[in-house]
Amino acid sequence: MKPIFGKAPPLGLRLILAVIASIILIVSDGQTNAMIKARSIMETAVGGLYYLANTPRTVLDGVSDNLVDTNKLQIENKVLREQLREKNADLLLLDQLKVENQRLRLLLNSPLRTDEYKKIAEVLTAQTDVYRKQVVINQGGSDGVYVGQPVIDEKGVVGQVISVGENTSRVLLLTDVTHSIPVQVLRNDVRLIASGTGETEELTLDNVPRSVDIVKGDLLVTSGLGGRFLEGYPVAIVDSVSRDGQNYFATVTAKPLASMERLRYVLLLWPTNEESRNVNTISPEDIRRTVQERLENQGNESRNVRKALVQEEQESAVNNHGSNTEDIQSSSNEESVPTDTPIEPNIDTSEPVEQQYREEH
């Protein structure tokens, strides 16, 4: 009896076709606007599933909140009120320090730090394996979220948005192996690059020379280079520094301040200036070019200062030489001036004396 359906293609052919299709998708992903729009559409379509999967946790949280003891709530309320008073006192001091900081920046002729608009987002799901460190949040394009937007929590930097759907967004964490962030040491402003390792509590600092002043316990903050993270947000604390005499670079690891394993709520940052939101991000090549220009300008300024010092030394030497010459000339003139003392002539008295002697004898 002849089968109704034809024979399926062999497994080897299907595997080859799947591998080819996967390679095409990997290469074309993020390269064209069509792929970016397709990713956004798929994020929007899958967003409903995230909300559905998160529903049991939301229901259980509501039930547990209703079953909490009243006494425990009163104690918690009292503790929170005390913390609120302390935070309000700190805010009063913070406002004063903020005004003072802006005045000092004006005195130093440096640009003012732009404030940011912050919004709380809830983590719906997390993908935290060795090769991928990402979370999905409940804020999307309808809420103003954009690709490249910085994300923080109450302790430090968490990561940045890499994909935006209508109601959800995907955030790439600091510890992902594909993520790097420009940082600087708060103690001495040494600028470095912190990269993810795939481990939840570990970052590595790339290309750190052995002579760089960095020690265990140093606080790393965002440097502002790259145009995505504004300067000054805490990132990590240096955990270990190893300087091997055989290697030119030191091995430095740091521990992120943000709680990557226990993320529940995060903060999305928007610059209040609309123009800074629409500005194009700076590529690493532009950053290197800017740093090179600054180094060249510093070298030119140092050379100009050296030339000015050399000219001043030459002028002072010429002036000193001229004054010495004048002194020598004046002393020689004084020696050549004739004195007023009369000079007695040489009178030869020997001849009259001899003649008188002859006459006597």
Image (tube, rainbow, N blue to C red):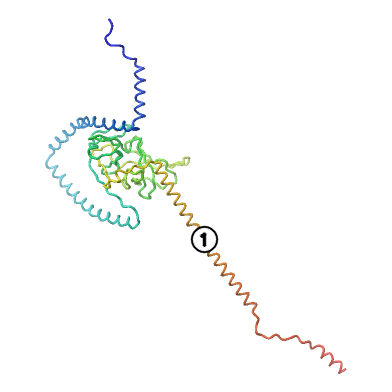
Percent from the top left, x then y, of residue 238?
A: 36, 43
Residue at 24%, 54% in the rendered image: 95
Say above or below: 98 vs 280.
below
Q: Which residue is mark 1?
A: 311
The answer to whether 91 appears left or right of 288 in the picture is left
**Residue drawn at the location 34% of the way across and 31% of the way down:** 29
**In front of the other: 54 or 102:** 102
Residue at the image position 23 percent from the left and 43 percent from the top: 119
Residue 235 visible in the snapshot: no
Count every numbered label the image shows and give the total. 1
Residue 283: quadrant of the picture: top left
Across and down, in percent, residue 123 comes to: 24, 36
Name of the residue lying farthest toward the left: 70
Q: Which quadrant of the rendered structure holds the C terminus? A: bottom right
Q: Residue furthest bottom?
A: 360
Residue type at mark 1: give it. Answer: Gln
In the rendered image, is residue 114 in sight? yes
Quadrant of the rendering where the N terminus is positioned: top left
Q: Is residue 306 above or below residue 163?
A: below
* Label 1 crowd (10 A; few <14 / some 14-19 / many >=20): few
Percent position of residue 23, x then y: 36, 26
Relative placement, left or right, of 323 versus 207 is right
Farthest residue, direction right? 361
Locate residue 190, reporting x and y percent. Answer: 39, 47
The kind of secondary structure element at disc 1 is helix
- Image quadrant in which you'd find residue 181: top left
Relative vertical location of residue 93 with respect to residue 137 in this rendering, above or below: below
145 and 360: which one is in front? 145
